[in-house]
């Protein structure tokens, strides 16, 4: 795609390869945002070509932020060859093939639409957008771009934990039979302190919604992925427990900041609870909160089918629990599968059995799967169309909560 071009705020350098793969065509990545998800995605791009045998060679070409000194420091720390201070300059660089969006939701649609129009592949963090309207435009643009050979994927990384991918494989193999129940909760506690400042995650115009879009989006995607089917409708309750918070002062990220004088209004939900019905008739329950004291990142999901059950807890992410209901009652029961075997998803490239992976590896696996989709011309999973459908579920939850939990069908 041509030579690296100089643009304002950029340092033009020969991009350093992110891995081995000499002789393979490069996939030159430009990433927007370099805080929490930026660091996690950097880890993914830096590592993926050194662990997996890929058809393309990811190159960490440029990272973009708004503060020149800070983005340069982030580029050095995380291994990006160049730094940009305007995402518009990043997406028009002809030495970038893929734009990786790690900013808050208010900029996802604008950056993704522009990147697709500029001929780039796109990886966009979740939730896909801040509204159904934005997500519809993004899904339509991604479909049009697909026909031109571009690929677009949403960053629902919890599909890429080996244990959840194994659970999906077992459901598809029929090991739990017809699904009857799915219950899932995503519990954190970083908002319990009412003096925690009003960061972007607490402002609707930046985040779209609160625990619902942040944590709820993950569990809706994971539930539908594991069930292998979509929700048909929901009944919901949402609540904002602390309605005023101190204004943030100085550098902030979505999860940390110092407080300044004065307070501002929290304009998103603090917690969302909803029940749902799958198209097959299976019933599901969902809980997303940042007020579950003592729970740090507890994503727990259980599926009960007529032939058995599966259960997973992100705080024990190398394990999957399985109950085979076809075994005689005398010795049936939940058993722990240690998901570290080479024939478990993603694990043939990692360590010997029993040596375990962590949170960061989900981003390596995400990069791996996207590289394959780009090289092989397949539709990445989850696509922008999948991200749009999750957005419709979130919108139905909000609509139901506004109407005293009335059952609200998911728009198709
Ligand atoms: N997949 C996951 O597990 C997961 C976890 C956390 C966050 N997220 C998602 O990732 C996204 C980012 O969240 P985060 O926690 O990394 O936030 P963060 O506050 O830690 O980082 C946001 C970054 O975006 C930058 N930014 C904001 N607006 C920008 C703009 N216009 N141009 C350039 N840079 C800009 C900020 O400077 C910062 O570097 C959100 O969509 C969030 O929902 C996903």
Image (spheres, rainbow, N blue to C red):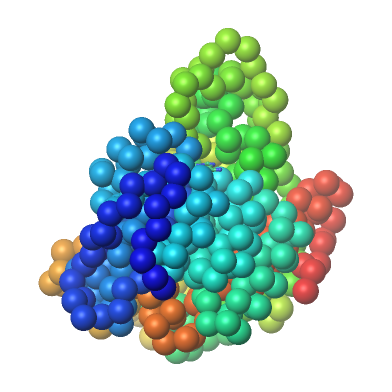
Residue 397 or residue 89, whichever sits in front = 89
Whole-percent x and y of residue 211?
60, 45
Whole-percent x and y of residue 170?
42, 82
Whole-percent x and y of residue 59?
30, 65
Residue 130 or residue 355, whichever sits in front = 130
Name the residue rendered at 47%, 74% in the picture.
309
Residue 369 or residue 113, whichever sits in front = 113
Residue 106 in view here: yes
As displayed, is residue 362 above or below residue 247? below
Residue 135 or residue 220, whichever sits in front = 135
Quarter of the figure with the N terminus = bottom left
Marker count (numbered): 0
Name the residue rendered at 24%, 75% in the picture.
52
Whole-percent x and y of residue 331?
32, 79
Residue 386 in view here: no
Side of 131 where 256 appears, left or right: left
* Furthest-top residue in this view: 261
As displayed, is residue 154 above or below residue 129? below
Name the residue rendered at 69%, 62% in the picture.
135
As displayed, is residue 142 above or below residue 135? below
Side of 249 where 241 appears, left or right: right
Name the residue rendered at 21%, 76% in the picture.
21
Side of 275 where 38 appears, left or right: left
* Furthest-left residue in this view: 352
Quarter of the figure with the C terminus = bottom right
As displayed, is residue 234 above or below residue 332? above
């Amino acid at each position: 795609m041509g030579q690296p071009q100089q643009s304002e705020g950029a340092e033009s350098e020969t991009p350093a390869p992110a891995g081995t793969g000499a002789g393979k065509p490069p996939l030159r990545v430009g990433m927007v945002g370099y805080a929490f998800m930026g660091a996690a995605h950097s880890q993914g791009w830096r590592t993926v070509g050194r662990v997996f045998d890929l058809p393309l060679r990811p190159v960490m070409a440029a990272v973009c932020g708004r503060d020149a000194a800070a983005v340069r420091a982030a580029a050095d720390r995380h291994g990006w060859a160049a730094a940009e201070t305007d995402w518009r300059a990043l997406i028009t660089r002809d030495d970038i093939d893929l734009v990786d969006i790690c900013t808050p939701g208010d900029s996802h649609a604008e950056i993704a639409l522009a990147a697709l129009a500029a001929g780039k592949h796109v990886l966009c963090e979740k939730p896909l957008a801040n509204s159904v309207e934005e997500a519809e435009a993004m899904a339509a643009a991604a479909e049009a771009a697909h026909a031109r050979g571009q690929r677009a994927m949403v960053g629902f990384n919890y599909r890429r934990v080996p244990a959840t991918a194994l659970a999906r494989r077992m459901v598809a193999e029929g090991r739990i039979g017809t699904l009857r129940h799915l219950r899932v909760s995503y519990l954190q506690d970083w908002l319990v302190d009412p003096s925690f400042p009003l960061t972007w995650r607490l402002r609707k115009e930046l985040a779209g919604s609160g625990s619902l879009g942040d944590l709820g989006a993950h569990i809706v995607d994971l539930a539908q992925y594991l069930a292998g089917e979509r929700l048909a409708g929901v009944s919901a309750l949402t609540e904002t427990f602390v309605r005023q918070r101190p204004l943030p002062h100085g550098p902030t990220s979505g999860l940390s900041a110092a407080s300044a004088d004065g307070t501002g209004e929290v304009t998103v939900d603090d917690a969302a609870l909803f029940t749902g019905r799958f198209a097959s008739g299976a019933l599901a329950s969902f809980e997303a909160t940042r007020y579950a004291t003592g729970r740090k990142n507890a994503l727990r999901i259980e599926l009960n089918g007529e032939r058995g059950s599966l259960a997973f807890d992100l705080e024990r992410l190398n394990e999957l629990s399985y109950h085979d209901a076809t075994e005689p009652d005398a010795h049936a029961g939940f058993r722990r599968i240690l998901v570290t075997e080479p024939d478990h998803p993603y694990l043939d490239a990692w360590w010997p059995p029993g040596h375990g992976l962590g949170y960061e590896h989900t981003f390596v696996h995400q990069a791996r799967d996207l590289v394959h989709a780009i090289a092989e011309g397949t539709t990445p999973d989850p696509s922008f169309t999948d991200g749009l459908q999750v957005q419709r579920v979130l919108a139905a939850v909000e609509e139901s909560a506004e109407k005293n939990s009335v059952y609200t069908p998911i728009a198709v």
